[in-house]
Amino acid sequence: MVPVRLWRSAGPGRGRALLLAGLLLLLLRQAAKQEVGRTSPPEPLRGEGESSGRPPPNVVFVKTHKTGSSTLQNLLFRLGERHNLTVAFPRYTYQFAYPQRFAAAFVEPLPPGAARYNLLLSHLRLAAGELGRVMPPDSLYLTILREPVRTFQSVFAYYRSTVPAFRALAGHPRTLAAFLQAPARYYDPADAGNGLARNPMAFDLGLEAGGEEGGSRWDRELERLNRTFQLVLIAEHFDESLLLARELLGLRLEELVYVRLNVRQGGGDEALAPGLVRRIRAWNWLDVRLYRYFQAVLWRRVERYGYTRMKGELEALRSLLQETRETCLAGDAVGPEETADELRPWQPDTAAILGYNLRPGLPPAQHASCHRLVLPELQYHARLYHRQYGRELRAQPGD
Ligand SMILES: *[C@@H]1O[C@H](CO)[C@@H](O)[C@H](O)[C@H]1NC(C)=O
Ligand SMILES: *[C@@H]1O[C@H](CO)[C@@H](O)[C@H](O)[C@H]1NC(C)=O
């Protein structure tokens, strides 16, 4: 069992990496145990498991950091599990050698008997050509963006002790303000570990912001991204985005159910001084541009979809979400102390990440569905990896 305090006692550097490796192994054993106990496919929430007959299209989801991407990844993991799809997993851990640019060599080879990968959903830094070497040419490319000030705040809180530019401020009382006062003092653009320290979403999408602000070069880069992605979801319009994804992927409304995952405790009610907001936007100028561009793209698509149709479907989706929460959850999201071990999301040492407990006494079929709905990223990843390869996920070469 996971020692109760382990998740708060992470140290910096290597100790932290080892801790993560150890935690992964624990998760893997738990995932493997659950696998052994299962004899027939788990039964669904209302309508969730009814197969629509044809399998969903192949999907690449570029999982950006701190944008609500875990919530969509969970939805796609569930879709993959339901249709027994083959997932392109990283060879080691749960991300593709991030922050290196994605390379085909980072992907675990196909399992015996599988002809192609269907889904690729783990953190990576975009390199579209390399993804094209791994995923079928008909794959749909999706990603998600979030309002850049919120994203940066969240990245800063989550990675304060791991990203070198932020780590330099450890112990400073008002760290975010201090960083933004003189970011160049802490930020070395040549250090790849600093990818998330400036324009984190643009970094994940493979852009090389450097010092070059403005200019038409970025218009071309954004247009290129708009051609790469069939859909860029916007976290602030998550349900609208999901409905667009639904049309693209041919899903039923019931297949869109989700609960928000990997949410930071207190993250919603941090007010920022206007000066600080301005500084965050200036520092993350390319993320601001990226977000503005794809927000406009999304709204044009909603317009094409039809406002009336969208409104009606939003109502239906939201009542379904409400029903699902009432069925599955013991209550609202709770802090790590209150989350059951196997449902506790991974905890960075600078923020508390909320999780969910299931309503006690759920009938087995519903319990299985609800369990998948709230299963944090690492646990779900480990479980599907084990299911696909019949062995445990490796944390590093030689494992
Ligand atoms: C799932 O796919 C694997 C190959 O990837 C295959 O061995 C297995 O029989 C499939 N199971 C079901 C229930 O379709
Ligand atoms: C982005 O691509 C879509 C097609 O997916 C197109 O309709 C739209 O005009 C493009 N947007 C811009 C701003 O180029």
Image (cartoon, grey):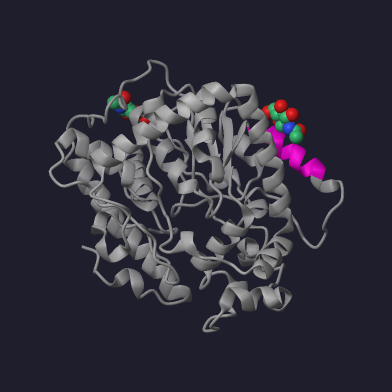
In the displayed structure, 296 sits above or below 291; it is above
Q: Which residues are magenta?
A: 219-229
Q: 173 and 323: which one is in front?
A: 323
Total number of numbered discs in the rendering: 0
Name the quadrant containing residue 277: bottom right
User: x%, y% of residue 245?
Assistant: 52, 30
Q: Residue furthest right?
A: 215
Residue closest to the eye, 309 or 177: 309
Q: Quadrant of residue 361?
A: top left
How far from the left and from the top, in percent, is residue 162? 52, 70
Quadrant hosting ligand 2: top right
Whether residue 100 is visible: yes
Left or right of 362, for residue 243:
right
Which residue is located at x 62 percent, y 51 percent?
204
- In percent of the image, x 57 and y 36: which residue is there? 142
The overriding secondary structure of the stretch rendered in magenta is: helix
Q: Is residue 261 left or right of residue 275?
A: left
Q: Tell me where residue 36 appears, x and y as whole percent.
A: 19, 42
Q: Residue furthest top?
A: 53
User: Residue 186, relative to residue 332: is it above or below?
Assistant: below
Residue at (36, 27) in percent of width and height: 254
Magenta stretch: includes residue 226:
yes
Residue 51 in the image, given as x and y percentages of width and height: 34, 20
Examine the structure image and report whether residue 276 is included in the region drawn in magenta. Answer: no
Quadrant placement of the N terminus = bottom left
Instruction: Report the quarter where the C terminus lies.
Output: bottom left
